[in-house]
Each structure stands twice: as C-alpha cells, then as structure tokens.
Amino acid sequence: MRLQDKTIAIIGLGLLGGSIAKTLRARAENMNIIGITRNKNLLTNEEALKVFTTVSTDIADLKEADIIIISTPIKSIISIIAKLKGIAKKGALITDVGSVKRTIINAATVLPKDVYFVGGHPMAGSHLSGFNHSSSDLFSGVTWAVCPSKNANANDEIVALVEFLGAEPTIISHDAHDKLVSASSHLPHVVAGVLADHILSGDNTGVELFIATGFLDTTRIAASDPVMWEEIINNNKDYIVKSLSGFQKRLNIWQKAIKENDVAQLTALLANAKQVREGVTKKAK
Amino acid sequence: MRLQDKTIAIIGLGLLGGSIAKTLRARAENMNIIGITRNKNLLTNEEALKVFTTVSTDIADLKEADIIIISTPIKSIISIIAKLKGIAKKGALITDVGSVKRTIINAATVLPKDVYFVGGHPMAGSHLSGFNHSSSDLFSGVTWAVCPSKNANANDEIVALVEFLGAEPTIISHDAHDKLVSASSHLPHVVAGVLADHILSGDNTGVELFIATGFLDTTRIAASDPVMWEEIINNNKDYIVKSLSGFQKRLNIWQKAIKENDVAQLTALLANAKQVREGVTKKAK
C-alpha cells in the first residue's frame, strides 16, 4: 500500500504533531489523517478541521491506524505506548518524536510482537509551542533520527514517512542518539537556562537596559516549556551530567586563561570557538 | 552651532563606525563627515565615498573635527586617544564605542583640559563585522551608554548625538557600566564560546548532524572576532571573573537538581529561567 493510502494517526497536536499533520496534508490531499488531542478547543478549530480527517480526544479512535505517531512530551509518550498495547491493530507501526530514545524504546518492549515500534526524533523545534505555531515547512531538510527496530520493513516504512515529510532520516542506535543530543541539544538548553537564571535573577539591577542580541540569542531557548524539558533532562540524565561535567572542565580552562591574563591562550580559545562554530552548517531549524 | 553643521570625524570604519556614518548621512545630507581608516580599500569604495565627505588613512586629517568618534577595538581606542592629544583642536569633543569603559576613560586623562572625552557604548553589534555589514538602522531604539565627563556641555552634546542617531542615551558611571555589561554581554560571550568549543572540538563524532536551532542560537556569538573579544575580556577581567564565578555557582545548583533527580527543584529552575527570559523586552539589536 502506498504511504498516501494509509491511515496515519497523530497523538498530541502541538508544535511537532501539528507540523507533521500539516506537512502530510500539504503533500497528500486525500490521506486519512486522524488527530488525537487532549485539547478540546482543537475539536472545533477551523485550521485543525482542514488538516485532519478526524480530530478526537479518544485514543480508541485509532484502532484502524496503520501508522501511529506519538508527539507528546516524554512521560506521556511512555504512558501512551502502554495504552496502545490493547488498541493498535496487528501490523500497526508506532513511532514517536521524543528527544530521548532509550527510556521510550524500553517502554515499547511491552507492545505485542506484531505491533512494531521504531523510535524517531526530528531535530526541529522552537521555544514556542502549540498547534498554532506548527507549520508545514518545519521539517524541510532537517535531520530526523530513526532508531531502528528488529523489523526491517517497519524501519523502511518510517524512513519513507520521514522522507515524505521532507526531512533527512538518519539511522542511529538509541544509545548513540541520546549521547549526541545530550551534547548538541540538552546541554545548550541547560546552559541557556542557567545563564538567564543567573543574570536576570541575580544582583544585577539595571541589567535589562544593557541587553543586546548576544544575550537574547544565547538565552532564547531558556523560554521553552519547563515541564517538557524537565522530562527530557531526567530521561537523559546520565549523558547530560557527563556533558555538563565536560563543559565545566572546559569552562575552567577558559577561566584560567582570563584570570591569568594569558592573551595567547585566550585568543586561541576564542579563535577555535569561532572556527568550529563557523564550520557547522545550518542543517536544522 | 547645530549638530548638522558640525564636522564629525569617525575613526575606524567597521560595523559600528560604518553604521554611525551611514545613519548620520541618512539624517543630515550636507554634514561634513570625515572617515579615518586603515583599510585602504575603503578609500575607493563606492558606498564609502557616498557616505563620507572625506575618507583618509591619516589621523592628522581631523584637526578641524568638532566631534571625534573612535570606533575601533579597545587597544586601538586607547592608542588613538594618545595620538589625538596633539591633534584634536581646542574645544573638540571625543567619544568612543568601546565595550569596556574604565580603562578607556583612564586613558583619556592624558588629553588637554580643553579637549573633552565622554565615553560611549551602543548596545548594538553582530558576530559579523566590517563596513560592508554596517547599516543606517543598527542603532534605532538601542540603549547607548554615555559615561559622563565633568563637563556638562560635552555630556549634553554626546547625548544629542546619540539621540540624533536614533538610539536611547543612558547616563551611567563607567564602573556601573562595566559591571552590568560583564553580566549582560561579556559573560554570555564567554559561555557561548566555551559551549561551541566543548561540543564541537570534543569527543562527539557525528554531533553536527544533530544540531538544531537551539545550539545555533546559543553559540551564534562564538563566531565573533577573537582579537576584539580578547581585548574586551582582558579590559573587564575583574567583573567578568566575578560574573563567571556566580554563573558556576548557579550551574552547580542546576547540576545538583539534575543529578539528584529533584523534579520539583529542576522544574522550578526551568520555570524561573523561562519567566525571567520572557520578561526581558527586546530593547537592543
């Protein structure tokens, strides 16, 4: 069966779930797309009604779904997987968009053998959230991690789905994924939060007047949803703690160069930071 | 004499100097604007020739300047002030755009009594540099610190100049300025540099694929000019070291909450970071 002819269910219609639905609809006018949400406002939302074939608050409404995409925060992903155990049809394919993969893939071991779980994680997001901020071009060209199951067909189907959404699938083990995103995403999140917290909650009366783009960019993601991020951090705690400790060691090297007026060393550190930062191509959104 | 009728000299025609000149020209078609640069290419640059009445590499060409704006990195600001001692005319007003004020204002004590120095610092910038990136709207609505001299007329004239450029003058002592920008600008710079350095130079093979906007924004300013920033950091070392040490203390509190799985504390820290970050209005560019 062609992907376009399948029934796709999306659970959680926030920034990512909404963007998946809008992208699918933009590319497959007649696809059967079911949206499951706890947000009752979406049941009568004009835009949602255009995007989804059906919007429902009842997870039992996806018994016929061929592919189920769970797009909620991590704790909910885990509890939804448990619920799907008795709902998903034989041969159904389940994937998710969670930022941490080990705990989720572990939770998915409760599923029956003929229901397949393939972990997913698009490297796209925003400090803004909700269906209203979702868009049909969020995933264009973006890396989408796919943590494979033992079923090659299931993996191929999720890769095809990711490609259909315009993203670039990258097959990676859940452990390697969690390690790399602890560095590329979770550590920057914690550091941005500490920076905003330290500078704006500390003893810096008047500091607001002296804030420029540098500070605003560096701390932008500190404005993200705290509950979602608490769950991400706690689910990837071991790697984040390691990454934080490496960051602190590096910070000490910079601090020593600053304290000791070591012009050559400080210039070299700044020049290296510039070089590696400029070397990063903007793959993601 | 009206500001428009004065001769304004700008030394250093990079992002800030170029933007000052372009803004002045946009607002005062006939103003006598002299540009002094070490960059010989600008002597024949079409855009520069439109903006400046005269472009020269010789600092002696600003003997007639009423107001001299030094827009170079800090070390050069300090050496140029020493040179201006024998060049600036009686009654001339000198200001600068340096990110640290104490060392510069101290250097300005060599000037004759009838040449007035008023420190300045616009909270505008970019990781990009050079005349080509300068623009006539860089300063619109931006806080521009003015560190006053003992001469009230001189201070008033610089305030008028800053307002003419569309920025918002904020009178502040050089010491208070240096303390506040160590928090709002210099610390984020160091942290962004350490983050880029740690994540992209460390043992994270494959991390580039998993980089999203969060990392890109948080580390954007790590791509700034290393020499300019070494000078800023070393000229504001005492306050930056203090600010870094406060940041590290705060980081330890976050790290403890993460390590100990303290969900309530971590959520509270994340929620506070979100709240204070959202409370910052975007005053600056």
Image: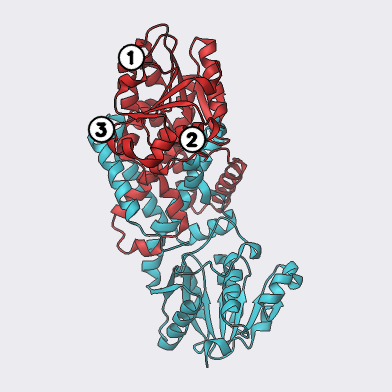
Chain colours: A cyan, B red
Name the quadrant of the N terminus of chain B.
top right
Q: Are marks 2 and 1 on the same chain?
A: yes
- Label 3 and label 2: CA atoms lie apart by 23 Å
Category of crowding for the residue at label 1, using alpha-carbon neighbours closer than 10 angstroms: few (below 14), some (14–19), many (at least 20): some
Residue A133, percent from left and from top: 62, 62
Which one is nearer the viewer's eye here, A10 or B23? B23
**Disc 3 residue type?**
Val
Q: Residue at x 34, y 35 (%)?
A: B229
Q: Are marks 3 and 2 on the same chain?
A: no
Residue B156, percent from left and from top: 55, 16
The answer to which quarter of the image holds residue A236 is bottom left
Residue at the right extreme, as displayed: A44
* Residues tagged 2 and 1 counted as in contact (Cβ below 8 A): no
Q: Residue at x 33, y 40 (%)?
A: B225
What chain does mark 2 sit on? B
**Disc 2 residue type?**
Ser
Q: Are marks 1 and 3 on the same chain?
A: no
Residue B35, percent from left and from top: 38, 29
Q: Residue tagged by mark 1?
A: B87
Position above or below: B125 against A151: above
Q: Is residue A152 left or right of residue A79?
A: left
Front label number (2 vs 1): 1
